[in-house]
Amino acid sequence: MKSVDFSVNSISGKLPSFNKGGFTNLESLHLSYNLLNGSIGARFDGLVALKSLKLGSNQLTGSIPSNLFGNLKGLQQLDLSDNYFQGRIPEHFVNCNNLTYLDLSYNKLTGTIPSELGLCQELLSLNLAGNRLSGELPTELGNLKQLQGLRLDYNNFVGLIPSIFEDMLQLTYLNLSGNKLSGNIPSRLGSGYLSSLDLSYNNLSGSIPPMLQKFTYEAFAGNLDLCGQPVTASCDIVKGGDDEDEGKGNFYIGLYVSIGLGFYFGFWGVCGTLALKHTWRYAFFSFIYSVYNRMYVTIAIYVARFQRKCLT
């Protein structure tokens, strides 16, 4: 028997042990989309010929065995996604020379990405999305020259996007969204065959490299300090707009200060003088009274004339 596929069933309980005789020639074991629980342990040590192990979308717990690749030296595909694995990603990837597909997404893995992952030279797809990984992105990932798909989204990564990512020319899919990455986007990122990109909801800043401006706004959304197409028309306009807004703010501050000072000195210049100078105060109120009388008389005359015209 070389292949076992019981995917998409309702198989429950703990994983059986495959260390007993009868499975030494097994190359493919697929048990995804079931209800399996418990830990992996050393249940696959006897599968020396195994090339593909897929246990995704179950209810498996515990940590990923540190000697997994030590025993499964010929493993090419490993899918442990959408389970409840905890702890760190094992550092012992020294025997992952044949690994082309690694999916550990949507678990509860913590810690940093081990630099030893850079030794998996044949990797075509790496998916660590939806975990609780942190720290900076290791530059050793740039050694994966054959990598075509890389998903590190929705973790807690910080720091810069390594410039060595520019040399991953075979990369067609890159998703680093939902982290805390900062700094500028490497100028030659995507110089190869990159056709799908998502850098949204990080803390990236600076101008978007010209070769990435073909992607839509959604690829860069949530990075408030990015400029250039497709986020803004150009970085010069953003800078000019900021200067213009700052100039407007300074103008209004000066205007309000001038109005306040003018009112203060004008009010107290008049009222203070009237309060201290008896003769000026008498003259001022006499003037007001005379103006009031003249207006009253003038209005009364016009009202009387209007009434006479209406009666005739």
Image (spheres, helix red, strand yellow):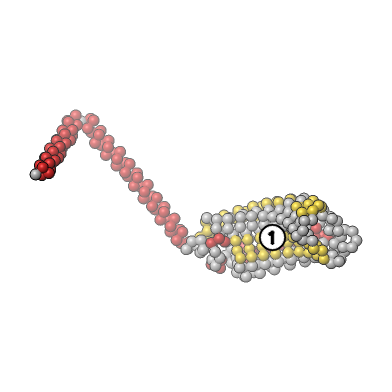
Quadrant in which the N terminus appears: bottom right
What is the tally of numbered marks visible in this picture?
A: 1
- Give percent across and percent down for residue 176: 62, 59
- Give percent across and percent down for residue 99: 76, 65
Give the residue drawn at x 84%, y 67%.
2
Give the residue number, with chain letter if any, for mark 1: 127
Q: Is residue 274 left or right of residue 200?
A: left
Give the residue drawn at x 41%, y 54%.
245
Secondary structure, mark 1, is strand
Q: Is residue 211 left or right of residue 154?
A: left
Q: Is residue 283 left or right of residue 268?
A: left
At label 1, which amino acid type do we have?
A: Asn
- Give percent across and percent down for residue 17: 85, 56
> Is residue 23 visible in the rendered structure shown here?
yes
Q: Is residue 207 above or below residue 287?
A: below
> Is residue 280 visible in the rendered structure shown here?
no
| Quarter assignment of residue 75 | bottom right
- Crowd rating for badge 1 (residues with CA inside 10 Å; few <14, some 14–19, many 20+): some
Q: Is residue 152 left or right of residue 67?
A: left
Give the residue drawn at x 39%, y 53%.
247
- Give percent across and percent down for residue 104: 72, 57
